Image: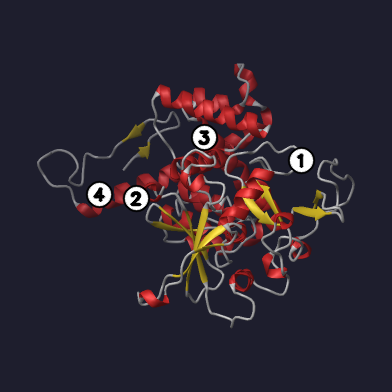
Amino acid sequence: MFDRDNDEGVVSSGLDGAGFGGDRDAAPDWRQLDRQLRGVARRRAALDAEEARWLVLAQQVELHRRFGYASLHEYLERTLGYGPRAARERLRVASALQILPRTAAALARGEQSYSAVRELTRVVRQDTERVWLDAAAGKTVHEIETLVAGRKPGDLPGDPVDPAEVRRVVSFEVSAETYALWRDARLALELERGEAVPDDELLRVLCLGMLAGAPGPSSGAGKRGRAAYQIALMQCPDCERVTQDGGGRTVEVPATVVARARCDARVLGRVDGDGDVHVIAKPTQTIPAPVRAAVVARDHGRCRVPGCRASRWVEVHHVRPRAQGGRHTLANLISLCGGHHDAVHVGRLKITRSASGQVGFVHADGRRYDAPPRTGDERDEPAAVRVGRDGAAPMDLSLAQWIERSMRPAGAARSTHATTILSLTGDPRTR
C-alpha cells in the first residue's frame, strides 16, 4: 500500500510483503492486488479533492501574480503540468465543489473519481445533488457522461434529454499544411459572415462541401434547384423523435433541424414497409426544383437577413408555413442561412411582409432586426409565447403532428407516421 510515512511526503510502496516482494517469481495474491489498486484510486480521489480546495484559495489570493504569471491557468500549466483544457476544467470543478458539499465529500472519500465528479458538476445543483449522486453510484465514467449529456443545471436524471444540448468532441491530428488550410477556411468563412464562426458551423460547412460539391448552379446536391436534406418516415412509438443518419450511425438531433428540413427537402416517404415496390412512393421535393432555383437566383444565392453575408448552403424557407396554407410561390419563399433559418423556427426571428410585398425582419420582442437590444427589466418572450408564431409549429400541435400534417395532401386521412429520419443528399454516385 502507498502509505504516507511523515509530513515531508515520503511514500513507501508497501510492495515488500503479501506476495509482492522477496521472491519475485511468486505470483501475487489477486485479492491483495485488488485492494492495493482500490486504495490507490481512493487516495488519488482524496488528493483531487484536496487540490480543489487549495485551488479555490489560490484563486482568492491570486497566487499566480506572485510568480509573474498572467493567470491562474498559466500557473497550473507551468507549475502543475496541466494542459490548457485540463487547467480550465480543474478550476471549474474546484469552484463548483464549493457549493456542492455532498459531491465534494464523495470525491474526498473516493466514492466517485475526479472524472465522474467533473461530469456531474456540469448539471448538479445543491437541490439536485443527492439525486444525481444516487443515480451515478456504481456507474462508469462513460455511463455518467451519457447520463449527463443533453441535460442542463437543475435537470434530474430522469428528465427528457434535449438533443440540442448534446455536444460531441471530435479531435484531429493534422499536418502543418492541413492546419494552415483549416485556419484559412475559418478566416474565409468569418470574412463572409462578418463575425466569428464557432467550430461547429465551420465543420458543418466543410462537411457539406465534401458531401455535395462546391455550391453553384451545376454542382450535384448543391444545385440551386435541389434541396440539401432528404426526409424518410418510419413508424415508432416515440412520436417526437428526430434522427439524422451519419456514416452509418443514427444520431438524434433537435426538433428544429427537421422543422428547417420540412421547408426545403426531398421526401422519400415511408421506408419501413415490406419492400413491395407498388407501395413505395416516388420521391418528391417540398419545393419544385424550378421554383427553388428561381428563389435562390432572385436572392443572389445569399441569406436575405440584413447584414448576413452567408452565401454557402442557403436554405429556402416558407414565410407562411405550409401547415398554415403557405404555398410554393416566389412571394412566399425566401433564402436563409442555416443559423437564421433555425432562429425563425424557434421564434427568435420573425419575417414580416408589407402590403407592397416588402420583406422585413424583427426580433421575437418586436424590435426591428437592426435595432439595439432593449434595456431594463424587459425580457425576451418565453418559449411558450414564441411557439405558434410565424415559422413555428402551432401551439395546439406537437412537432410530430405538425410535420405529419404539413406533409399530408389536402383532404388526406391522418396517418401514424412517427419518427422522422434526416440525411444529407450528396452521394457521389448520384451527382
Contact between labelled residues 3 and 2, with CB atoms less than 8 Å apart = no
Q: Nearer the viewer, mark 4 or mark 3?
A: 3
Inter-mark Cα distance, 4 to 3: 33 Å
What number is the disc on residue 306? Answer: 1
In this view, the residue farthest toward the left is 25
Q: Earlier in the sequence, mark 1 or mark 2?
A: 2
Secondary element at image label 4: helix
At horizontal 77% and vertical 63% (from top left) the residue drawn is: 389
Q: Amino acid at mark 4?
A: Leu
Q: Nearer the viewer, mark 1 or mark 2?
A: 1
Contact between labelled residues 4 and 2, with CB atoms less than 8 Å apart = no
Q: Residues within 10 Å of mark 2 (few under 14, many from 20)?
A: some
In this view, the residue farthest toward the right is 376
Q: Earlier in the sequence, mark 2 or mark 3?
A: 2
Read off the residue under disc 3: 85
What number is the disc on residue 33? Answer: 4
Read off the residue under disc 2: 38
Contact between labelled residues 2 and 1, with CB atoms less than 8 Å apart = no
Inter-mark Cα distance, 2 to 3: 27 Å
What number is the disc on residue 376? Answer: none
- Residue 136 locus on image (x, y percent): 48, 60
Q: Residues within 10 Å of mark 3 (few under 14, many from 20)?
A: few
| Quarter of the figure with residue 66 | top right
Q: Amino acid at mark 2?
A: Arg
Q: Amino acid at mark 1?
A: Pro
Inter-mark Cα distance, 1 to 3: 37 Å
At horizontal 31% and vertical 43% (from top left) the residue drawn is: 1
In this view, the residue farthest toward the front is 290
Secondary element at image label 1: loop
Q: Earlier in the sequence, mark 1 or mark 3?
A: 3
Secondary element at image label 2: helix
